[in-house]
Image: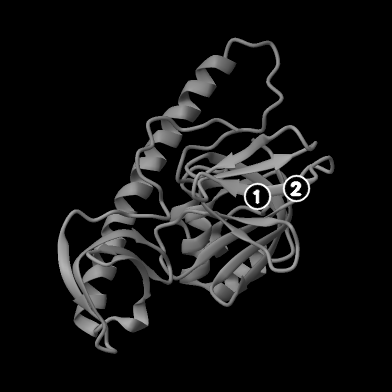
Amino acid sequence: MRRATNLVFLIATVSIAWSDDITTSGGKAFKNAEVIQFTGEGLTIKHDGGTNQLVWQELPATVRLRYQAEARKRKEQEIEKLKQDLARAEAEAAKLGSGTAENTSPPVAKAGKTSAPDEAAKPIAGLALLKAGDVVDAADLVLQFKADSAAANQRYRKKTFRVRGVVERFEPKMFVRKYDVLLASTEKFVRLVVGFDYPDNLKAVYTIQHGQKLVGKPTDHSEVTLLKVGDPVVFEGKCQGLSDSEIVFSGCRLVR
């Protein structure tokens, strides 16, 4: 795994510069409100009375549409920046590895593409046979499921392969001490969720720095960083297909 450099913004959170008075559909008013964070469920605002989280359904239609349009615009800009950073990082890695006698890492495709050049632009029916070890870009995978979920399920469901992307955020799993890893894409309503199998020696796993870093504790007196928001990563696992707007991978291991 190689970290992309100079990442200033998080994919899961987008800041807005202007302040405004916001009144919810229920009549609750917030003076001089500034949106400090967007999520899939709504937004977090800072106002004269403190800080509040609002879900999209609480906002009048005109206000909701205005902020959702801004959220999509900012997220697309950040996704594009991360893809460029990932491409530069992979190019640097290729240069460093070109002079070695043996390179044990799997072949690396260009950022934003699947393991074969130009496959992302083709219909699913025209893609080469998927094999174990193939690398598929997370953004391309989401677009394929969105365009033709039946064909995408037939191609990818119950298949084990590698998915490459950028860590968007971490979400705790109910009733177990584990976290799912969400990979970024430009699609707001389709998520790519990776079920990450942690090393067996970890006694605890949790997030720090306001959810930006996932860490584990192999002993009572140590702490190791597993992943950070903005990290370019490759996971290998079994795709469970699309269900309830989520493309889920299970039993994943971190390749890099």
Instruction: Identify the residue position indicated by label 2 in the image.
Output: 204
Quarter of the rendering occupied by the C terminus: top right
Secondary structure of the residue carrying numbered label 1: strand
Secondary structure of the residue carrying numbered label 2: strand
Decide if residue 61 is in sight here.
yes
Q: Amino acid at mark 2?
A: Ala
Quarter of the rendering occupied by the N terminus: top right
What residue appears at the point 48 percent right and 70 percent down from the top-left corner?
A: 146
Q: Residues within 10 Å of mark 2 (few under 14, many from 20)?
A: some
Out of 194 and 115, give the one closest to the viewer.
194
**Could you tell me if the residues under marks 2 and 1 are in contact, i.e. CB atoms within 8 Å?**
yes
What residue appears at the point 68 percent right and 64 percent down from the top-left corner?
A: 173
Out of 247 and 70, give the one closest to the viewer.
70
Residue 31: percent from the left, percent from the top?
Answer: 18, 70
Residue 70: percent from the left, percent from the top?
Answer: 24, 63
Residue 222: percent from the left, percent from the top?
Answer: 73, 32
Relative to residue 116, is residue 10 drawn left or right?
left
Q: Which of the labelled discs sits on residue 206, or is there none?
A: 1
Relative to residue 42, is residue 65 drawn left or right?
left
Q: Amino acid at mark 1?
A: Tyr
